[in-house]
Amino acid sequence: MIAVVAPIVGLGGRIVLWDINLSARPGELLVLAGPNGAGKTTLLRAMAGLLPGFASQDPRRVAYVPQGARCAWGMSVREVVALGRVPHGDDRAEPVEAAIVACGLASLAGERIDRVSGGEARRAMLARALATEPDALLLDEPTADLDPAAAHAMMALLRRRTAAGVCVVVVLHALELALHHATRLVVMEGGRIVADAEPEAALPRAALAFGLPYGLNPRAGLLPPAQGERYGADRSGDDQGR
């Protein structure tokens, strides 16, 4: 379990979080949602032990991937993913190769990380975290650079990790991803947690936080991939920027 209990959290001389009491348990895929400036990233960083006053986390147990994580070095995708073993001080190949395959990067493993697309680089950053084999994954907007199919595939991958007992906490703006994949939706507004429930139960409060109406939409829309669909080894649908 990973938890944060804090009456107030201050940064830069101002209070940014209020009345926080949140814990994420093994086997959960918890989504933090809310409008810009609600405090989602700050709360995630507190859970990661990256803010003053919060205990540091063991990097072998807790893997944190910040928003926009990218590697500009001239390393291969495989070399970047292998950095996930640094906290353990070993060079075991099995977790690295398993993470590469899980994230659909097998055909890109030898490519330079600074020459792949934004979505592919995002998947490499996730693979690096998976290679650590952590008990908890803390991810800030991991689907931001991905096309819809790739975003669903990533969330499905994270959900499968929870089946193995991993605790996953994800910051998302895409509520449709939370509805399809999360086990729990925590809504934030103004630095406070205003809802904490199963996704469908928390959705009305999320709509209010975003200033949007809540209800059924009869218009046609995209559906998530079939259950169990995984990243393809040669998938190239998220190749913007290449």
Image (spheres, rainbow, N blue to C red):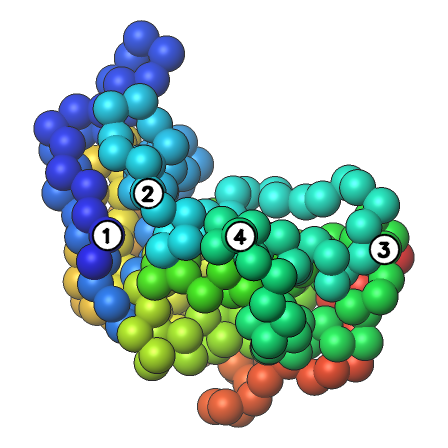
- Which mark lies nearer to you, 4 or 2? 4
Q: Is residue 40 visible?
A: no
37 with respect to 117 (left or right): left
Q: Earlier in the sequence, mark 1 or mark 3?
A: 1
Give the number of the mark in front: 2 or 1: 2
- Marks 1,3: beta carbons within 8 A: no
Q: Cα distance, mark 1 to mark 4?
A: 23 Å
Q: Which residue is mark 3?
A: 112
In the rendered structure, find residue 89 and report the number of the disc placed on it. 4
Are discs 2 and 1 less than 8 Å apart at CB? yes
Residue plotted at (86% across, 62% down): 111
Say which residue label 2 marks: 57
Instruction: Give the residue type that dot 2 points to.
Output: Gln
Residue 198, percent across and down?
A: 21, 68
Q: Tell me the element at label 1.
A: strand
80 vs 87, nearest the viewer: 87
Determine whether 168 is above or below 95 in the image.
above
The residue nearer to you, when weighing 209 against 85, is: 85
112 displayed left or right of 174: right
- Say which of 207 and 160 sits in front: 160
Amino acid type, label 4? Gly
Q: Residues within 10 Å of mark 1 (few under 14, many from 20)?
A: some
Residue 200: x %, y % from top left: 25, 70
Residue 2: image tag: 1
Q: CA distance from mark 1 to mark 3?
A: 34 Å
Verify CB contact (< 8 Å) between mark 1 and mark 4: no
Sequence order check: which comes first, mark 2 or mark 1? Answer: 1
Q: Residue at x 25, y 31 (%)?
A: 54
**For the residues marked 4 and 2, what is the alpha-carbon distance in whole angstroms?**
17 Å
- Give whichever of discs 1 and 4 has the lower sequence position: 1
Q: Amino acid at mark 1?
A: Ile
